[in-house]
Image (tube, rainbow, N blue to C red):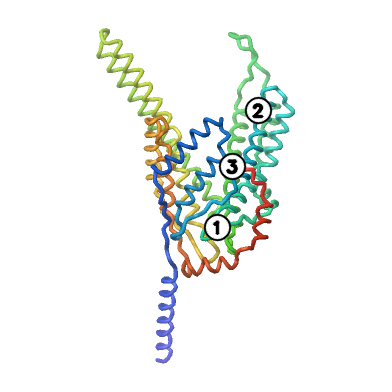
Amino acid sequence: MDVQVSSERARARSGLRSSFESQDIEPHTMRFTGSGGEYFRVWIVNVLLSILTLGLYTPWARRRTAQYFYGHTLVAGSPLEFTAQQRRMVVGFVVLLLLTVAYQLAVNTGQDTAVGLFILGGAALSPLIWGSAMRFRLANTRWRGLRLQFAASWREVYTASWPVFALALVWLGVFWGLQPLAPAAVVNEETGRKLPEVTAPLIGLVALGLLLTVLCIIRLEFNYRSLLVLRSRIGNEAGRWKPVYMDFVKLWLATLAVFLVSLLVLVALVAGLFTGSLGLVSKLGKGGMGLGIFVLIMAAFVGALLAMMLATAPARAYREAALFRLTWSNIGVSRIARFKCNLSTGGYVLLRLRNMLLTVLTLGFFRPFAMVSEYRMKLESVTVHVKGGVDQVAGRLGRQQPGGIGDALADAAGLDLIG
């Protein structure tokens, strides 16, 4: 009897504890307080000044855009801040501009050795550039005065970047493999030119190279995203990451399926449109030949518009939404916060197609409204669950925040080539 009573009391205490813990976790849906009309004013000024300065206004435009979206993004009721110094963004932009100009000069003047060195140097430095960009982005993001940090070492960044170098080895192997597999060139009887003969082994080798390329790209994306989350810091608290590599492979396979379905729909629509136009022209007869030609031209224009919109847009939008949901439903901050995302991939695809159509019809002037609507849909699908209350957590993180010397060292560690 005493054992039964004690077990009932234990269950009651357990239920009370679980109830208390559930009440101790506060859900906060992220909000975006901006509007398309407000951002249009920022966007149109950026476009006009970029045109007038031949693109030299780009770093200022990027900073104004980041400040607008950060300032109107509410996380647990408090806005984000973008604190990057304009001078550092300008220096980074100028360095990249000079490197791009030097590369184009080497390409246009036929300096193959210099071009090869640029490509090899770019491949070797790409992990450094990515790590610097992530360090810059997080170091200049603040929430409630708390500064984010990217604490990954350069060794960790280069280790995560192994698919970049594997990709180079893959295509080096494909190039070497093509030499013994390629048969002797065949002379074309019509043109008299020698053309390489395409054989099954050649096709198989190139197909294998493409398959390994896709797998390397997927692995690189997984490595970079997981490293970014796991080595990010707010205070002394690290990020948590749950997805595995196969989650990303499945996402890419689903994207391929969406692309194939979109392609079939596109072919059916264009074929139906063309068939209907031919039928209309035949009914008009010779007297309406001019009108018939006009109808065919309009049909071709509409078909080209459909092809442009439906060929890859649904697949790209699906991948973006699915990747966003996969990421934000499986990350957290130590033991104090976790995120959940309920973004509808179908709804996002439809929104993207609508925005593309309106952007084309308005000659690009709907673009800022499209950016705001897509950003809002993604952001407001995320809910952050904070354990212990926002004020208490923010206070504790503030006490863990590194001082001014730590901030300066964090700034000095990044190249800030990408603002």
Which of the 4 image quadrants contains residue 201? top right
Label 1 vs label 3: CA separation? 20 Å
Q: Which residue is mark 3?
A: 217
Return the x and y of residue 111 as percentages of the image width and height: 72, 25
For marks 1 and 3, the one nearer the N-term is 3
- Position above or below: 81 against 320: below
Marks 1 and 2 in Cβ contact (< 8 Å): no
**Residue furthest bottom as drawn:** 2
Tag 3: residue type? Answer: Ile
- Position above or below: 388 against 171: below
Return the x and y of residue 413 as percentages of the image width and height: 68, 52
Label 2 vs label 3: CA separation? 26 Å
Judge the density around disc 1: few (<14), some (14-19), many (≥20) Cα neighbours within 10 Å. many
Q: Is residue 252 left or right of residue 179?
A: left
Tag 2: residue type? Answer: Gln
Judge the density around disc 2: few (<14), some (14-19), many (≥20) Cα neighbours within 10 Å. few
For marks 2 and 3, the one nearer the N-term is 2
Which of the 4 image quadrants contains residue 293? top left
Judge the density around disc 3: few (<14), some (14-19), many (≥20) Cα neighbours within 10 Å. some
Of marks 2 and 3, the one in the foreground:
2
Q: Which residue is rendered at x = 70% and y = 52% of the image?
A: 155
Q: Which mark is residue 104?
A: 2
Q: Which residue is rendered at x = 43% and y = 58% of the image?
A: 383
Tag 1: residue type? Answer: Trp
Q: Secondary structure at mark 3?
A: helix
Is residue 88 or residue 342 the one in the foreground?
A: 88
- Position above or below: 352 against 75: above
Q: Which residue is mark 1?
A: 241
Q: Is residue 215 left or right of residue 305?
A: right
Return the x and y of residue 340 as percentages of the image width and height: 45, 58
Image quadrant in which the N terminus is located = bottom left
- Position above or below: 86 against 335: above
